[in-house]
Image (cartoon, rainbow, N blue to C red):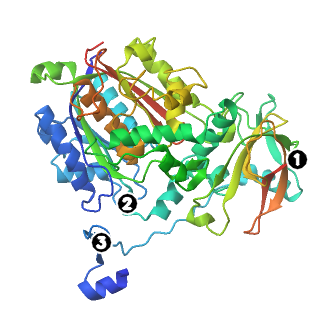
């Protein structure tokens, strides 16, 4: 089967984007992606749009973009996997090329969450588990889902709220260096601790924000990479995908995400990775809440179970530490436009591996491998993708 | 400025954003959603609550389901027996929902917990107790009438 390469990548500014509508926001990432790949819209064989979209007005985003950006009559679809929607879109692009059905696929992730007022977004986002058994009667919110994990984790391992706060501090530190981030401001642990509780023990600064944004990558087959003479590219080495139960009460434990462990195992096996810390140069993990990043360290094997909070406490996931994580600000500071997040992670993998990250947030690239970990819901879906400079 | 006012003033439902001043069109077609879900397959669960019982389904193969489900994926049969759960177990985790959805704004911040019942299944519900992390906290399930007037269940510390 053919290798699949990312040959172009683009990113909009994330944040409150009331200045643009949906196609305008899409174009902000689509244009640079096409330019980097040196392609025109007509060169795209197939395109896929990751968009959750219940809070925004337009449901047929692929059609909207076919019209706005001259992609008609090429094939397309919109995909959804909660907060892992962007990675689900990457999977469609990846497998479409792998299967030989297309040579060039555009993967676009877009979310315009602020087309609805915040209370509506909070109301809707709480429904990404089992709506009937968890939300209807017990009003479990999205922060609540992760708070249940934070409590269990703290009770089992003795982690403190300050340890969670360290994740927010790190991600804001790097967000401040990312011109596309929603929050470009450093914070300290005291700021995190002073924040009001959203869902105890999670406070305001433990939570990623409500964000508008888009991200875009262009994928190409091995044949096309040669034909176009593309120099700057990264390869998708592998992808693992897992699904978890809808009801949290159907799970055996609340200190780890089984779907993430499953996805990581697949991705590592397919990419020949036995020791992720030694074989990867860094990672983007799904830090929708600070506890999620700590569990990700463990689920991805960056440390043993129960030791993730120590990596946070010791600052081991800054550049120069054991393994750099979320050095673009993560969902926490860069922002979390649901459908765009997974694609934004792919853009970051592309930038980091090609050493094109902004000053102060470029990791050392020695192994030429970067990992992305994108979770939908609370481990309801997990996509782990490994990108590399060299084709496997 | 509300939408009506905006239309009268500018001729359109267009209002500048408070912070940035960029123009926003306010949708005049408001959408209200209320889903209609089938509970025909689990109607015994609600009959059980009326009798003060917490019911689960049990397949002939021995597999126990809570929340109850009609079909067994293990043996592919749908001949479930309704069994009463013991209503006691251990609290495994909890949270306090401070920022509530609008549809729960008539409640004070509420505690949500997950308990593992002695029968082996887990249950998620509101926890009527101090939101403290105590390893091994025993709880019982109580059938309660909600503010909205219908029967539900809560976890209560023992």
Q: Distance between the residues labelled 3 and 2?
A: 13 Å
Left or right: residue A389 versus residue B52 is: left
Residue identifier under label 2 = A114
Number of the label disc, if any, that sits on residue B25:
3
Nearer to us in this view, A374 or A323: A323
Q: How far apart are marks 1 and 3 (CA)?
A: 55 Å
Quadrant placement of the C terminus of chain A: top left
Residue occupying image coordinates x 45% and y 47%: A208
Helix or strand or loop: what does disc 1 sit on? loop
Query: From the viewer's perspective, is residue B37 above or below residue A228?
Result: below
Left or right: residue B90 versus residue A344 is: right
Decide: marks 1, 3 in contact (CB < 8 A)?
no
User: Which numbered disc flags the more N-terminal residue, 1 or 3?
Assistant: 3
Residue A28 horizontal/vertical position (percent): 20, 49
Pointer 3 indicates a residue of which chain? B
Nearer to us in this view, B115 or B50: B115
Residue occupying image coordinates x 30% and y 76%: B15
Q: Residues within 10 Å of mark 1 (few under 14, many from 20)?
A: few
Helix or strand or loop: what does disc 3 sit on? strand
Pointer 1 indicates a residue of which chain? B
Query: From the viewer's perspective, is residue B124 above or below residue B7?
Result: above
Residue identifier under label 1 = B158
Q: Does mark 1 fall on the same chain as mark 2?
A: no
Decide: marks 3, 2 in contact (CB < 8 A)?
no
Residue A261 horizontal/vertical position (percent): 54, 25
Q: Residues within 10 Å of mark 3 (few under 14, many from 20)?
A: some
Residue A206 horizontal/vertical position (percent): 50, 46
Nearer to us in this view, A299 or A302: A302
């Amino acid at each position: 089967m053919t290798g699949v390469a990312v040959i172009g990548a683009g990113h909009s500014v994330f944040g409150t984007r009331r200045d643009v509508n949906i196609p305008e926001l899409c174009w902000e990432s689509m244009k640079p992606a096409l330019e980097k790949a040196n392609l025109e819209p007509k060169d795209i064989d197939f395109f896929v749009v990751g968009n959750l979209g219940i809070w925004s007005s337009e449901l047929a985003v692929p059609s909207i973009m076919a019209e706005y950006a001259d992609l008609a009559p090429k094939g397309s679809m919109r995909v959804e996997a909660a907060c892992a929607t962007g990675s689900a879109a990457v999977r469609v692009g990846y497998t479409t090329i792998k299967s030989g059905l297309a040579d060039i696929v555009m993967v676009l992730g877009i979310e315009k969450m602020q087309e609805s007022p915040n209370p509506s977004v909070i109301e809707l986002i709480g429904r990404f588990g089992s709506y009937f058994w968890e939300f209807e009667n017990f009003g479990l919110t999205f922060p609540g889902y992760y708070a249940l994990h934070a409590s269990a984790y703290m009770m089992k391992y003795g982690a403190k709220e300050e340890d969670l706060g360290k994740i927010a501090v790190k991600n804001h530190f790097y967000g401040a260096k990312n011109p596309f981030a929603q929050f470009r401001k450093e914070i300290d642990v005291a700021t995190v601790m002073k924040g009001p509780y959203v869902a105890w023990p999670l406070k305001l600064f433990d939570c990623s924000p409500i964000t508008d944004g888009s991200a875009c990558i262009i994928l190409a087959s091995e044949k096309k990479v040669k034909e176009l003479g593309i120099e700057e590219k990264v390869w998708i080495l592998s992808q693992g995908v897992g699904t978890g139960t809808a009801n949290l009460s159907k799970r055996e434990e609340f200190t780890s995400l089984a779907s993430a462990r499953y996805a990581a195992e697949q991705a590592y096996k397919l990419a020949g990775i036995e020791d992720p810390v030694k074989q990867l140069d860094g990672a983007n993990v799904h830090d929708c809440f600070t506890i999620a990043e700590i569990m990700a360290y463990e689920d991805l094997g960056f440390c043993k179970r129960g030791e993730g909070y120590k990596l946070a406490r010791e600052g081991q996931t800054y550049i120069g530490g054991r393994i750099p994580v979320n050095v673009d600000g993560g969902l926490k500071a860069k922002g979390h436009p649901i459908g765009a997040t997974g694609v934004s992670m792919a853009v970051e993998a592309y930038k980091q591996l090609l050493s094109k990250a902004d000053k102060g947030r470029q990791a050392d690239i020695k192994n030429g491998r970067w990992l992305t970990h994108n979770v939908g819901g609370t481990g309801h879906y997990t996509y782990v993708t490994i990108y590399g400079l060299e084709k496997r | 400025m509300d939408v009506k006012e905006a239309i009268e003033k500018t001729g359109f439902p267009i209002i500048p954003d408070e912070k940035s001043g960029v123009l926003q069109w306010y949708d005049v077609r408001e959408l209200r959603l209320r889903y209609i879900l089938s509970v025909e397959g689990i109607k015994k669960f609600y009959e059980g609550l009326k009798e003060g019982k917490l019911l689960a389904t049990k397949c002939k193969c021995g597999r126990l389901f809570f929340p109850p489900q009609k079909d067994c994926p293990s043996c592919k049969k749908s001949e479930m027996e309704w069994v009463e759960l013991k209503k006691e177990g251990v609290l495994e985790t909890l949270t306090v929902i401070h920022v509530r959805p609008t549809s729960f704004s008539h409640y004070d911040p509420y505690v949500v917990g997950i308990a593992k019942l002695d029968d082996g299944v887990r249950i998620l519900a509101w926890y009527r107790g101090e939101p403290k992390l105590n390893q091994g906290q025993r709880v019982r399930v109580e059938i309660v009438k909600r503010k909205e007037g219908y029967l539900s269940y809560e976890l209560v510390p023992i």
